[in-house]
Amino acid sequence: MEVILAKGKVKKAVFPVAGLGTRFLPATKAVPKEMMTVVDKPVIQYVVDEAIEAGIEHFVFVTGRGKGIIEDYFDIQFELEATLKARNKKAELEILGSLLPKAGAASFTRQQEPLGLGHAVWCARDIVGNEPFALLLPDMIMKSDIGCMKGMVDLYQVSGGNVIAVEECAPELAHRYGIVARGEDIGDGFRITGMVEKPAPGTQPTNFFINGRYILQPEIFSILATQERGAGNEIQLTDGMLKLLAQQDFTAYHYKGQTFDTGAKDGFIMANVAFALDRPDIKHLVEHDLKALVAALK
């Protein structure tokens, strides 16, 4: 097995944002699911913020038809800014400026067909090039004192190779997820000795599931280029990672914060509640109304 040492910073991150968002129809007929707001920020902004905290410098968005609004969001909107300046809305202008990537720091490439996550990652190959990169699934937003990707980057400096974030689930729910097998401890995680996608109940090697954050070596691209279609007749990233696992080390970062799947209706609602309660400016209002709502249900 090839040992890949950490080679400086992980500078690029890939965000696969080409999904159709069918679970949120009819809203996603007009608004990409990544642009639906949690409190007052689009879901994609939370994920990009997590990458920025981890030191990411270049953001690669793999888009699809109807996702042009995401590209517009990460650009200057001259009419809006001119109006805010004319009205002396300095606080709002500062917010918009802080969210804007540096010139040339955001790239957009198109996934013409919905052929799976593995195919979406492969579509970013020429922009990423021959260097390790982060991969963040935009449906999953994290809430913790130290961002999930920041913890992964710190672990990568120790472990090298490939790093996958994992969380613990109830053993009886393991069949819903991609599960990893556990080897020796390394820093804030452990060596991965195997992976299985949605194991049959009772057959899972552990209860550690993959939560949508990865640091991968560029060799994954050549594997995905010839990867046969798997579950759902799609090119699956997990299948590609299993092949890479035979060649390179994989380390699990044990993430212990909160994760919200905003691609599911319940996860999206709970994300709004959790992040609203974390906001000093609206916490007392939300908390009061939630208590009243719960009391009315009794």
Image (tube, rainbow, N blue to C red):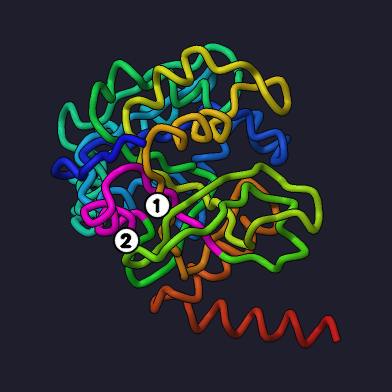
Q: Which residues are magenta?
A: 149-167
Mark 1 burial class by Cα count in 10 Å: few <14, some 14-19, many 20+: many
Residue 125 image point, x, y percent:
35, 19
Nearer the viewer's eye, disc 1 or disc 2?
A: 1
Which of the two labelled residues, at mark 1 and mark 2, occupies the earlier sequence position?
A: 2
Dot 2 amino acid type: Gly
Above/below status of 28 relative to 9? above
Residue 115 at x, y = what percent?
60, 19
Q: List the residue tagged with mark 2.
A: 151
- For the question of whether residue 78 can be seen, the reply is no
Q: Residue 87: give x, y in percent of width and height.
A: 23, 50
Q: Residue at x 23, y 34 (%)?
A: 58
* Placement of 145 over or under 58, stated as above or below: below
- Picture residue at 58% right of the left edge, 45% below the top: 195
Q: Residue at x 65, y 22 (%)?
A: 234
Element at label 1:
strand
Position of residue 245 in the picture relative to residue 265 (left or right): left
Quadrant containing the C terminus in the rendered view: bottom right
Q: Quadrant of residue 292?
A: bottom right
Left or right relative to 129: residue 243: right
* Residue 274 numbered mark, or none: none
Residue 246 percent across, percent down from the top left: 46, 34
User: Of residues 2 and 71, which is closer to you in this image?
Assistant: 2
| Residue 96 visible | yes
Horizontally, residue 197 falls left or right of residue 51, namely right
Who is closer to the viewer here, 221 or 281? Answer: 221
Q: Three-letter amino acid code at disc 1?
A: Thr
Q: CA distance from mark 1 to mark 2?
A: 12 Å
Residue at 49% across, 17% down: 111
Check residue 251 in the rendering and tell me which mark sits there, or answer none: 1
Based on the picture, tell me whether residue 153 belongs to the magenta stretch.
yes
